[in-house]
Image: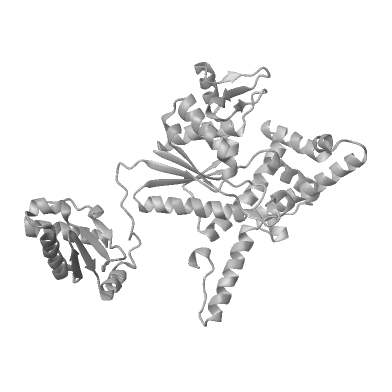
Amino acid sequence: MKNTIAQTLQKALKDLYQLEWTADASVIQKTKKEFEGDFTVVVFPFVKAARKAPDTVATELGNYFKENLNCDFNVVKGFLNLSFSNELWINFLKDNRTDVNYGYTAVPADEPVTLIEYSSPNTNKPLHLGHIRNNLLGDSVSRILAACGKRVVKVNLVNDRGIHICKSMLAWQKFGNGETPETSGMKGDHLVGKYYVEFDKHYKAEIARLVEGGMEKELAEKQAPLMLEAQEMLRKWEANDPEVRALWNKMNNWVYAGFDQTYKQLGISFDKIYYESQTYLLGKALVEEGLQKGVFYKADNGSVRVDLRDKGLDEKVLLRSDGTSVYMTQDLGTAQLRYEEFKPQQMIYVVGNEQNYHFDVLKIVLGEKLDKEFGRHIFHLSYGMVELPNGKMKSREGTVVDADDLMEEMIFQAKEETSGVGKDFAGTNVNEL
């Protein structure tokens, strides 16, 4: 409606005062509550060109609006208050209700990319309530920016490697008896998550037995046979052992199929999906660049670090003493990769506030230490974590609110509510609720 008023005002100024004015909705405001009207036009910017008093200009413009937009008006000094009939609003709704692009600003041809990362699940468990919150935040921000004329690219970084993945793999190998999504009737992500919980159960039992035998708990946690086997499996994975990689591919594919079902039900999609198994080695070249520049240093144990104590942080490890990557190494390289691929004007990371420190470091290391322009345009959209009455959700212990169960319950409750008031409910997708 503001655009319609602005266009009418543009025509009125030309017809009444031969004034060429570039339509600008900033002179149009919502009418203040103490005055009668829907929208207010501030006429002071046009008084000098019209060579008339403010209230006279407002009255003449008001009559023009009344004739061309069929609205009422009143004038308070240099303010023109416009009132539109219910019939006009109803007709406006009828005219625009089928326009899927209504409210969207067209994306300029030269508009750079705004990149948004969200979801970032692990392939050892299904999505839960915390993921729903993250996905809805990320998707909502993406839609809002797109509606405002931004060229948005939505990305997901799947954490598909590491010790936690090996725990599920090992537990399935030991206790699964060949169970599959087909034989169990379970979604693939739920099946793999089941064995992540199974690992934790057997791991705790092993720790208890070692402690009963006289071992300190801290040592028992490191020496428990299951943990040692999981660590060995991870080493084999990193060495490209064919059997371990085959099992990893099989179980990850189960999870991806499950994720796809959940994302579809939730109405979530991505323009590109990155996988940690393909990105975890990235960033080493940037670490070497920092060493050559003298902004990073090698510690006595051989690890590479950056000193951020002058920023109120601490000394952050960028490469372990054995030369292997840490999460920060990966994120440095992934940010560089995304810049090379999309040249984004901003990279937005939708991640809970438990990672505030991580993203503070990422921005400083890229933007200040390495002097990367794109590093200065990283924004961490931080939010509070979801917790249950008894504390933080723990997937390994099975104390989570499952995303699929939650959506199923929402649909059930919606059906109950609508049938209770005599309405028919046909929705099978959360987007239809």
- Residue 55: where, in percent of width, then height? 13, 61
- Residue 375: where, in percent of width, then height? 45, 32
Relative vertical location of residue 78 with respect to residue 308 in this rendering, above or below: below
Relative vertical location of residue 361 with respect to residue 189 in this rendering, above or below: above
Toward the bottom, the furthest residue is 422
User: For this rendering, which residue is in front, 280 or 41?
Assistant: 41
- Residue 20: where, in percent of width, then height? 11, 51
Residue 213: name its quadrant: top right
Residue 51: name its quadrant: bottom left
Is 14 left, or right, of 136 in this rendering? left
User: Does the rendering let one see residue 189?
Assistant: yes
- Which color scheme does this rendered protein use? one colour
Relative vertical location of residue 6 with respect to residue 72 in this rendering, above or below: above
User: For this rendering, which residue is in front, 16 or 114?
Assistant: 16
User: For this rendering, which residue is in front, 388 or 213?
Assistant: 388
Is 186 left, or right, of 340 in this rendering? right
- Residue 312: where, in percent of width, then height? 55, 30
Pick the quarter of the image with the N terminus: bottom left
Is 201 left, or right, of 305 in this rendering? right
User: Does the rendering let one see residue 19?
Assistant: no
User: For this rendering, which residue is in front, 141 or 433?
Assistant: 141
Instruction: Give the mark count.
Output: 0
Residue at (25% x, 72% y) in the render: 88
